[in-house]
Amino acid sequence: MKTTPSLFEVKDVDRQFYAKRLAAFLPERIIDIHTHVWRAEDQPPEPPVQDSRLVSWPARVAAVNPIEDLMETYRLMLPGKTVTPLIFSGLPQGGNLPRINAYVARCARTHHVPALIFSDPSWSAEELERRVKAGGFLGAKSYLALAPSYIPGKEIRITDFFPPHQLEVHDRNGWIVMLHIPRDGRLKDPVNLAQLVDIDKAYRRLKLIVAHVGRAYCDEDAGNAFDVLSATRRLVFDFCANTNAHIFEMALRTVGPRRLLFGTDLPITRMRMCRITHDGHYVNRVPRGLYGDVSGDKNMEEVSGPEADRLTFFMYEEIDAFRRAAERLKLTRRDVANVFAGNAARIIRAAGGR
Ligand SMILES: [Zn+2]
């Protein structure tokens, strides 16, 4: 008998949700294109001052996510499926970038999974290329927090953390670039859209993955984005940590099922919640008390009683929203298998992985 406590609780409501809505919809083999792994020992001892350019609620779900926890999460949440993750670190803090990248490289080797480096925009082209190759990575993830600190949060552009000299390296090698777009306007922001279109035109070999469907969590975040993006040829989109079926439907109509990728953004989607939107903002409804004091967080709302008892995992809500979009558009089994594995396999192979 296993005596160690479970990593997190799986309840009847979860098992029923999975069995009724997801198990038969999902293919047997899955590639999860967007996951974060990190260890406690690589984190700074003092919690760093929160960067006011970021949201704070994700830190409440998991303090750490070593690769063993990630694999255990799949066993608990996607029973009967074989899942291969693309891994990268969490946000670097307190000068730990070399250590968190080294940990990801080691996990990739020992678990035979593909991985991305967390890149720093201050690296030269040579330094980026050397570090990616030395670690056996297939490209890079970076984040707006790595943009030079003199740039106000609202003004950060994609090329402030993925500078052109680095995009050229990725392009030359056919590597993957995992992008969480900046700016309050999210997907519809005209600067984001202009840079996405530019990158799509200028770089023919790199694979730019626009994470979370460009952070379009609310219908209002799309604006005219899908009209603009209909001119692109190569950009791909993951829909991790997004539960908006209408946005998924628009993305599918615009770029088709070969340019959408399943990802989870684990460990965040272990969260028990459902997301609602009002007036163009998203709110995560969570069981009262489960994630500490969230009273100061405009993206969180607590519920109790039968409403709380019905809540299941963020990841299940995400997959179920995609299922509804897929059914509305009458995607075939093959389309769904491509979104959950085939498209990612193609990109990973093209980047030099297996
Ligand atoms: Zn992420």
Image (spheres, rainbow, N blue to C red):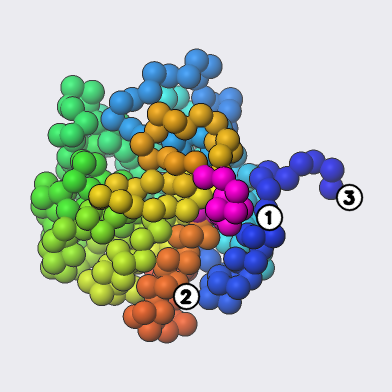
Which comes sooner in the sequence, label 2 or label 3?
3
Please name whichever residue, 203 or 299, is drawn nearer the observer in this view of the structure: 299
Q: Is mark 1 within 8 Å of ligand 1?
A: no
Given the image, on which type of amino acid does mark 1 rest?
Lys
Given the image, on which type of amino acid does mark 3 rest?
Met
Q: Which mark, by number, is residue 1?
A: 3
Dot in front, 1 or 2: 1
- What residue is shown at x 42% (from left), y 52% (from top)? 275
Q: Is residue 68 above or below residue 98?
A: below
Is label 1 in a helix, a strand or a loop? loop
- What residue is shown at x 63% (from left), y 44% (from top)? 69
Q: Position of residue 280 (x, y in %)?
A: 25, 50
Residue lying furthest front: 305
Circle 1 residue: 11
Which comes sooner in the sequence, label 1 or label 2?
1
Please name whichever residue, 283 or 191, is drawn nearer the observer in this view of the structure: 283
Q: Which mark, by number, is residue 337?
A: 2
Dot in front, 1 or 3: 1
Q: Check if residue 339 falls in the magenta segment.
A: no
Q: Is residue 265 above or below residue 13?
A: above
CA distance for labels 1 and 2: 27 Å
Residue lying furthest top: 46
